[in-house]
Amino acid sequence: MAEAETKSIDNASIRMIEKAAKDGVNTAFDRAEAMKPCPIGMVGSCCKNCGMGPCRVPLPKGGTETPEEKKKRRGICGATAETIAARNFIRMIAGGAAAHSDHARGVAELFLAAARGKAPGYEIKDEQKLLQLALDWGVEIGDRNNQEIAIDVGETALAEFGKQEGELLFLKRAPLKRQELWRNLGVAPRGIDREVVEIMHRTHMGVDQDYRSLLKQGVRAALADGWGGSMIATELQDILFGTPVPILGKVNLGVLSRDEVNIIIHGHDPLLSEMIVVAAQDPQMIELAKSKGAKGINLAGMCCTANEILMRHGIPLAGNFLQQELALVTGAIEAMVVDIQCIMQSLPDIAQCYHTKIITTSPKARIPDAIHIEFDEHNAMESAKAIVKTAIENFPNRGKNIDIPEEQSDLVAGFSHETINYLLGGIYRASYRPLNDNIINGRIRGVAGVVGCNNPRVKHDDVHIAMVKELIKNDVLVLQTGCSAMACAKLGLLTPEAAAKYAGEGLASVCEAVGIPPVLHMGACVDNSRILMAATAMVKDGGLGDDLSDLPVAGAAPEWMSEKAIAIGQYFVGSGVFTVFGVTWPTLGSEEVTKLLFEDFETMYGGMWAFEPDPLKAAHLMIDHIDQKRKALGIDKARERVLYNMEMRREL
Ligand code: SF4
Ligand code: MSK
């Protein structure tokens, strides 16, 4: 038990780590202990981009070397430690941007098929957002019907991926000053695919060998993710499935049911999961479940697919990234349905110890020993029903070795950028004005986006929770997505009651007046684009400068692990936001590359990276940055509240 307690802060996970040990199941926690990270690769000093290598160029022991020695520290092709670290770093950006953007492409394709009437079961749920997007992209509205408009919107979206010239359309959403800065620095992205491909070209042996130039392309591709792929995914998903509004949900393994068929949907793509939600409510399916001895069907989510179906349907969250294996260890899952991203290959192996069926659904993400039921968007309900049926038929195979932890917590999710606008300003005056006003009067010190994954190199959930608690205690409103949101939800930080319990006086008073939690759940990892939109709305509302880099805001991914996290961090930095990562930092093998990212980027982009594994220290780096921005805006001194008499009102 003591050992399991060092691995997670979450009691449900601790109990399942214990059970896994008893059941002889090997999890990521065990593998992380058995396999120490390679100290050379960890800091970005290993290149394997050609057959002459892999080349390792670590700093000499003690970290000091003469200029002559440094000159010799090269790969076989002559690549320096700087080139190697920069290449590795931007290849991570390419991976992350590709993942988000290929997800977005799938959404755009389905969107277009739905608009053309070729994807039965899907329809336009948010007409207002469709029209807004049409306006933003210059698609004619006139007296055309939604279907006609949606076809043009879908075609415009798809064209963004392969665009060869010009700029991505969403760049125009950014503050004008930011757009100019991107153009002046030559990082305004062209087509999304083009920027990713160009990274792969430039990092091929013998191409771009100046770390500054490599990192510049990294920024361009990351912006193509945040203001391109991710934003397209979020917008089109909202139009198809509905823009999220606040909704009550539950989180943790305690949401699993003892007497119902448990189906977990895991991954990132809401296209299929939306249909599974409908299929699981089908009376025929429920009857079938009952005929197999179950009381019904219990659907729960895992990772970002979970965030998607929670926000729109209130489907409970079984857990975050490091709980995917632990969910199987309960012995109570009939089927875990996976789509794309963040899915561990160990799942089928663990499933064999119980009765669980692992079902892959994407042609892009197959796993040996899993059952493959391919999702056919033209026949989505059929695919969804086949999956639900497979799970139901597996219920009689449930064994006796079952342990479902009690833990489950309430949370409120669904704070889309539009919802925040409405909650703050009301239906007729929707605006960010009250937020800006409360930042200016000092009740809210600033805003932080705390996002990202879990990583077994640190104690599960602990780093997220410690950082977020420290931020809200210091009157910083926190916006969250991904696995980080789930970590904090488990502690109850995503409920309105958390304001009185954990937030500083100023933040608590605003949260209580508006009726919102001090930590707002904004969705899945692609929905970090919502945070960009919220920050842009703050700039446009006035009083807090005229660019994103003027805002008293900061970002963090304290338990990051995925390449997507690096792409997200880089698009925040490239948009002017100070961003702190924990766990490890992948360019420490080159002082020059690290200095460019941590210092020089601030002069160039008004935002820079930082690395601080200690969550409290990291929170204070963010708070210090917020305070500096407040000072620069001249709002660092708490203003006296003046009660206006009639004469003063007339004058005003
Ligand atoms: Fe080594 Fe250069 Fe080949 Fe990289 S590209 S593996 S540094 S020879
Ligand atoms: S699922 S990318 S572990 S947030 Fe989006 Fe969680 Fe990170 Fe995957």
Image: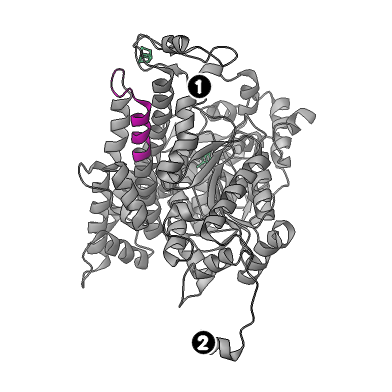
Mark 2 and mark 1 residues within 8 Å of each other at the beta carbon: no
Residue beneath the point at 26% across and 59% down: 137
Q: Secondary structure at mark 1?
A: loop
Secondary structure at badge 2 equals helix
Ligand 1 quarter of the rendering: top left
Q: Disc number at residue 63?
A: none
| Residue 39 locus on image (x, y percent) | 56, 18
Look at the image and give the residue range highlighted in magenta: 205-220
Q: Tell me the number on the disc at residue 589.
A: 1
Q: Between residue 355 and residue 290, name the one nearer to us.
A: 355
Magenta segment, principal secondary structure?
helix
Q: Is residue 370 above or below residue 306?
A: above
Query: In the rendered view, does 135 fall on the left or right side of 95?
Result: left
Decide if residue 219 is in sight here: yes
User: Picture quarter containing residue 38?
Assistant: top right
Q: Residue at x 71, y 26 (%)?
A: 21
Q: Is residue 555 above or below residue 652?
A: above
In screen coordinates, is 355 left or right of 652? right
| 584 or 24, nearer to the observer | 584
Depth check, mark 2 against mark 1: the one in front is 2
Label 2: few (<14), some or many (≥20) within 10 Å? few
* Quarter containing the N terminus: top right
Quarter of the rendering containing residue 11? top right
Along the line of sight, the residue nearer the viewer: 409 or 162: 162
**Residue 425's spot in the image, x, y percent?**
51, 73
Q: Label 1 is placed on what type of residue?
A: Gly
Indicate which disc, 2 or 1, sits on the residue closer to the N terminus: 1
According to the image, label 2 marks what residue?
Answer: 651
Three-letter amino acid code at the position of disc 2: Glu
Residue at position x 35%, y 35% in the image: 216
Query: In front: 566, or 337?
Result: 566
